[in-house]
């Protein structure tokens, strides 16, 4: 039976849940994640393959922005049975919806970005660290130094608290601000973490959850985890200055992995780390996590006639600015 590719704008919840069932290990395809994105004003899409009436492959995507200035986002591109059909379908939906920019990410996905994508394509390599949950973290290859830090936190009586309350998100923001400040003082380039609107929406839809290591209600380390039926994704994390010296970050990963393992999940995806942050890379690797090389891509899909028109307009503007202005005197 032949395969038919479709791109459905505002798909039914039946289709969204069917995609979720195809990818129980990818949090970015859960119905709760889609609901959170919709609450933020994004338009959902389903990029799917059908074999007759049966959905056999698919990824969720989102449209951001107003018509004629839209941006199409695929958070987690998954394997497709016919990449040629997918590429043509992606090009068609971007033209139809006037989305002249597209971002293809591979969060939690098992493959690099395919070749032959439409438009002007800029790819960048990325790395994720996968921690299996089939045993306790100390038995999965964690280094001696990491095990010492975990033991220190236990001896200090630190404990795990899980929450979806707004107050916990405030504490999470404070821990991240503390981490970013230390990195900035070391001369590192750090991302802007001032807006936690997306995290609030994910908490509200129950797509995400906060895990925090505390001592007498004082948060030492905090992590935001997006979950699916079989996996957790370590979305963002921070640690206070006190937490750095108490093993709180190490203990946090240990406690998250134990909690998810007890709930029947199979992996904890620790996410990536930029090459200019070797400390974070070492931190994740030393838990015994498996490093998986991936890719992301930015697509510039502006039609050539529009691009040429913009070049002409920019040239005219530069010419006009170069004309000497008259003083107005005669």
Image (spheres, rainbow, N blue to C red):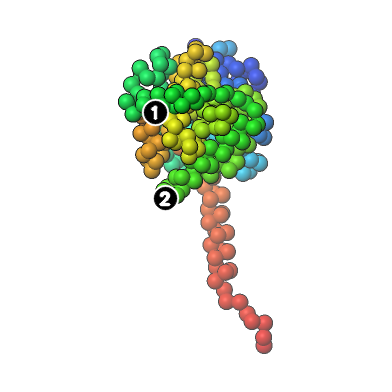
The location of residue 278, given as percent across then percent down, is 36, 39
Residue beneath disc 2? 187
- Above or below for 307 versus 260: below
In-front residue for pair 19/67: 19
Q: Distance between the residues labelled 1 and 2?
A: 26 Å
Mark 1 or 2, closer to the camera = 1
- At a point 35% along the width and 17% down the height, the residue shown is 139
Secondary structure category for the residue under label 2: loop
Which of the image's four quarters has the C terminus? bottom right
Earlier residue among tags 1 and 2 = 1
- Above or below for 156 versus 65: above
- At a point 53% along the width and 44% down the height, the residue shown is 192
In-front residue for pair 178/3: 178
Asked whether residue 42 appears in the rendered view, the answer is no
- Crowd rating for badge 2 (residues with CA inside 10 Å; few <14, some 14–19, many 20+): few
> Would residue 153 appear left or right of 66 to someone viewing this image?
left
Secondary structure category for the residue under label 1: helix
- At a point 53% along the width and 42% down the height, the residue shown is 177
The location of residue 257, given as percent across then percent down, is 46, 20
Q: Which mark is residue 149?
A: 1
- Crowd rating for badge 1 (residues with CA inside 10 Å; few <14, some 14–19, many 20+): some
- Above or below for 79 versus 64: above
The location of residue 171, given as percent across then percent down, is 59, 35
> Would residue 296 appear left or right of 15 to someone viewing this image?
left
Q: How many labels does the image show?
A: 2
Residue 174 found in image quarter? top right
The location of residue 314, given as percent across then percent down, is 55, 60
The residue lying furthest to the bottom in this view is 330
- At a point 53% along the width and 16% down the height, the residue shown is 229
Asked whether residue 302 appears in the rendered view, the answer is yes
In-front residue for pair 191/87: 191
């Amino acid at each position: 039976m032949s395969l038919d590719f479709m791109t459905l704008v505002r798909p039914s919840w039946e289709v969204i849940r069917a995609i979720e069932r195809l990818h129980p290990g990818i949090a970015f395809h859960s119905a709760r994640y889609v609901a959170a994105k919709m609450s933020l004003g994004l338009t959902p899409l389903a990029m799917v393959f059908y074999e007759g009436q049966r959905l056999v492959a698919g990824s969720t995507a989102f449209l951001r922005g107003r018509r004629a200035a839209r941006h199409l986002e695929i958070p987690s591109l998954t394997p497709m049975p016919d990449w040629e059909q997918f590429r043509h379908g992606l090009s068609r939906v971007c033209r139809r919806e006037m989305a002249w920019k597209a971002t293809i990410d591979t969060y939690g996905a098992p493959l690099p970005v395919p070749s032959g994508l439409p438009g002007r394509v800029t790819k960048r390599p990325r790395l994720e660290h996968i921690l299996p949950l089939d045993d306790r973290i100390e038995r999965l290859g964690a280094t001696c130094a990491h095990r010492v830090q975990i033991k220190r936190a236990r001896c200090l009586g630190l404990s795990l608290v899980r929450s979806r309350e707004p107050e916990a998100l405030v504490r999470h923001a404070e821990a991240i601000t503390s981490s970013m400040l230390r990195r900035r003082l070391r001369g590192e380039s750090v991302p802007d973490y001032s807006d936690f609107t997306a995290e609030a929406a994910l908490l509200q839809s129950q797509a995400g959850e906060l895990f925090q290591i505390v001592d007498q209600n004082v948060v030492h380390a905090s992590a935001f985890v997006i979950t699916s039926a079989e996996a957790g994704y370590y979305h963002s994390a921070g640690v206070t200055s006190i937490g750095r010296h108490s093993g709180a970050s190490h203990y946090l990963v240990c406690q998250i992995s134990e909690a998810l393992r007890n709930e029947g999940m199979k992996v904890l995806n620790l996410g990536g780390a930029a090459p200019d942050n070797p400390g974070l890379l070492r931190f994740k690797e030393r838990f015994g996590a498996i490093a998986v090389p991936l890719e992301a891509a930015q697509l510039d899909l502006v039609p050539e006639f529009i691009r040429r028109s913009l070049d002409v307009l920019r040239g005219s503007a530069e010419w006009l600015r170069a004309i000497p202005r008259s003083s107005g005197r005669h």
